[in-house]
Amino acid sequence: MTTVTWTSDEIMTVTAARSLRDGMACFVGIGLPSTAANVASRTHAPDLWMIYESGTLGASPDHLPLSIGDGILADTADTVVSVPEVFNYWLQAGRIDAGFLGAAQIDRYANINTTVIGDYDDPRVRLPGAGGAPEIAASCREVIVIMRHSRRAFVDKVDFVTSVGHGAGPGDRERLGLTGAGPVRVITDLGVLEPDPITRELTLVGVHPGVEVSAVREATGWDLRVSDDLVRTPAPTDTELSVVRSLTGAA
Amino acid sequence: MTTVTWTSDEIMTVTAARSLRDGMACFVGIGLPSTAANVASRTHAPDLWMIYESGTLGASPDHLPLSIGDGILADTADTVVSVPEVFNYWLQAGRIDAGFLGAAQIDRYANINTTVIGDYDDPRVRLPGAGGAPEIAASCREVIVIMRHSRRAFVDKVDFVTSVGHGAGPGDRERLGLTGAGPVRVITDLGVLEPDPITRELTLVGVHPGVEVSAVREATGWDLRVSDDLVRTPAPTDTELSVVRSLTGAA
Amino acid sequence: MVVPLGEAVRQLIHDGDTVALEGFTHLIPVAAGHEIIRQGLRDLTLVRMTPDIVYDQLIGAGCARKLVFSWGGNPGVGSLHRFRDAVTDAWPAPLEIEEHSHAGMANRYVAGASGLPFAVLRGYSGTDLVENNPNIKTVTCPFTGQELAAVPALNPDVTVIHAQRADTAGNVQLWGITGIQKEAALAADRVLATVEEVVDVLDPVPGQVILPSRVVDAVSVVPGGAAPSYAHGYYERDNAAYKDWDAIGRDREAFTAWLRELTSAAPGRTAPTPAVPPAPGSPDAGDPEPAGRGA
Amino acid sequence: MVVPLGEAVRQLIHDGDTVALEGFTHLIPVAAGHEIIRQGLRDLTLVRMTPDIVYDQLIGAGCARKLVFSWGGNPGVGSLHRFRDAVTDAWPAPLEIEEHSHAGMANRYVAGASGLPFAVLRGYSGTDLVENNPNIKTVTCPFTGQELAAVPALNPDVTVIHAQRADTAGNVQLWGITGIQKEAALAADRVLATVEEVVDVLDPVPGQVILPSRVVDAVSVVPGGAAPSYAHGYYERDNAAYKDWDAIGRDREAFTAWLRELTSAAPGRTAPTPAVPPAPGSPDAGDPEPAGRGA
């Protein structure tokens, strides 16, 4: 048994940060995605170009914002544009390399629900809704999903498709006219899932230190396939952890 | 015979200036329209709000610009917006009260040609083209045309409809979905024409001091109707003339 | 042009109106929202891309019949519990909803500001939003044959914004994150701007948006009128107040107490002190919240 | 990123390309246009809302196969005689034209910048532009049934602009009348910006447009590169040069002499002295020019 010296949020954050390549334009949401992007820009990706949907292009906040519209984002941005402009001229035009999304539910084809749990007209739980997620899922060159692993969240079929992942399988994104590649990776507190190159079904490709495959399968609401090339996530480095903790105030 | 103590451009300019009411938002082109609007704002219409298609909203230049994009317009404007914004958010949205247009040709229904003389594919004279005129003619609440009177310019049918006046007569603007009232007045160096309320045909409603109706009919390429209520343009006042001349450098 | 807030709301907003109080995290017209609650307006169709706690308050106070929106949450904190309660349990009144994506809403305002009946975008394709919203259709490009999404123009009866400054003539100036306010204002029949201050001359500021006075119907001076959101250059976002709202909004009784305090306060009062202390720990820990999106 | 103009033009612009040199009276990339002439580029489809004297020069020099535009004139002066000569007498080469209104062109760039295949506007209805341009069609609003104009997106191979400044990272800053440059740049595959100067840090300026370096392919430092148009904050518009062009452009021999001088000048030279004196009086007095419209 591994001695865990980091939290599940920290391993998710570090793994997500590693998914970003230097020089990318990254559409950043609040919470773990913002932390992950800021970790990346402080470690291996100093030229990561962060866009928040409030219209701040090239923001480099010195602390984590609570909202996507905090003043620190405008203060540090290369430029601030209007909301129509960020969605039309930047996102829809295909200028964003990577987008981060969270989800209340995700299904085996990485379709995402952030709208309702239960029936739309008589919901059990009403969630905040779509925001910019449908367009991020449609138009970013690639999408990275970050969310905690549980059977309640990883479901065979989402209650509501807020944002399209890989639809019902191969060819669906093209048929729907979605220009980006869609979700290329789902990072959880247990491991990493990626769509199978052929079937587009989410497949376990990595587990975090100390996590058993059986635990991941147990936390997934469908019969999760496991890659032949399963890897174990390298432990967070001291540098990564100290950057994460300096940002989250957990230092 | 009246002793003419002003030029034909000056009487046109003064008459056009008088057509503008205080507080109007006026879409201004270069040349006589710009002079007229600036005369109005310096005489009876101090709150005239001048928009130039370069995106300068509320410009108040201290001298006449040569182009619609001179620096003096940006320097004195309430705000400068982009070209898509001036056309979409301001003109198309119906926020402009009055637009000034010139023309190479105008016909009896006040349709305007600024594109070609002769055949489009083999023109005798190639003119600058549409610019913003089609939208000004379509969307300003009212349009005022300023041009010199001649048989070559006032034709039964324009060679090319660049901007729609009253089409082929009553009901055409509505049928074409044009939101503004169209040309309400044509001001020339000889007099003033307005569309007949019923037939929409341009009718002579005023002649400038010293001008005979026969001269106007002679200079018009169709059988020009004359209003029963024909008026004679009041002579330019000393104030009007001195303002015009201070602007045009003819003082 | 410059009138007290109570008078401006009375003149411009009426029962049954479609009202957009816009602001994208920054410059949210909170004080104007509270005045709407105080005046007891009813049957409003509330419109906003990112309805947050002031919309939670308006909904909880029973002002709204319908909400048109794209993301309804407490930015960085979690859900809006008055909104949830209205949707799932019709408390205090049923709330009809029409929901879009951000790009859909933004382009609806753009079409509204442009005098067009609809806007075209790449979006919605394959989502369940389409079948639950009759205001999402498709249109075919006449040049390429591509099918794209179409949404109708949004033209509120009234748009309310908060800005840093106005001049005495009523020209309004805002800067920092300017969001969708320009389009929301230009799309509306009537515009109310609350401002931090009125000045003689608006010195130009980088990144500014100017709304010329001819598109503004009333300006009301309300210093702090965007709190607990912020006014760039004037005051910071009160993140604690957003976190504190969670416990109040979560509980009908706590909310009712908060509402009683708001409506008994003198007009012009911008925000009451939270009536209950925030709950200890992370109240949203058990909720299936999306982790990845803020407002 | 920062390269000499000759090199930038060689790298980014090729025979047969669709090239937009944009600028709405202000910040016109004249020096870049002259470099295109010097390099002898051919078969270009030239695009611009307001082709003015530098387009007259490019057309007269035989660089263009086609012109896509909305108003082709010498702003405040009159017609473009090289443009006229090419259209009416195919000199020095036939010139195909595709013409729009300003709103049509502006919205074509907006669609291009937005990754949409077409744009919708109220326009063209009832005009003869429709029947002479296959790129003007209609589309029906799926909500109201209204018929509106549709124009295809405009996506130049290369957009060339002139701006006041860039920083060493290649971020470009322009202000004053910013026209259509942002959309024209974002719509293009490649972007060349000539600038008055390169600075370490771009101090914010009211009314600025920033083009982030990731959408700019090359920056060339060309002080005075917009003359005889102007660069707000740097130099004024040379109105006399526009007036003087009339006599040169009107006459094939005078133009040919002007062209010879331009092409024999050292690269980087921004504008030759007029080769002939301007004609006395108003040269356009006999022309049926529209009196009411500028650029």
Image (tube, coloured by chain):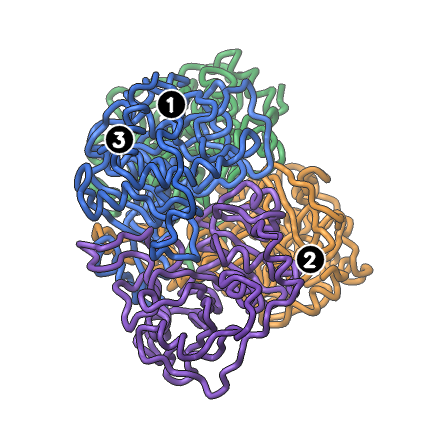
Chain colours: A green, B purple, C orange, D blue
Q: Is residue A178 visible?
A: yes
Q: Is residue A124 visible?
A: no
Question: As rendered, which of C64 and B115 lies closer to the eye?
Answer: B115
Q: Which residue is mark 2?
A: C32
Mark 1 belongs to which amino acid?
Ala
Q: Give the chain letter at badge 2.
A: C
Mark 3 belongs to which amino acid?
Thr
Residue D90 percent coordinates (x, y): 17, 43
Tell me what residue is drawn at x 50 percent, y 26 percent. Answer: D165
Is B247 situated above or below D30? below
Mark 2 belongs to which amino acid?
Ala
Asked which quadrant contains residue C4, the reply is bottom right
Q: CA distance from mark 3 to mark 2?
A: 67 Å
Residue A190 percent coordinates (x, y): 42, 27
Q: Which residue is mark 1?
A: D218
Q: Which mark is residue B250?
A: none
On the same chain: label 3 and label 2? no
Question: As rendered, which of D74 and D268 lies closer to the eye?
Answer: D74
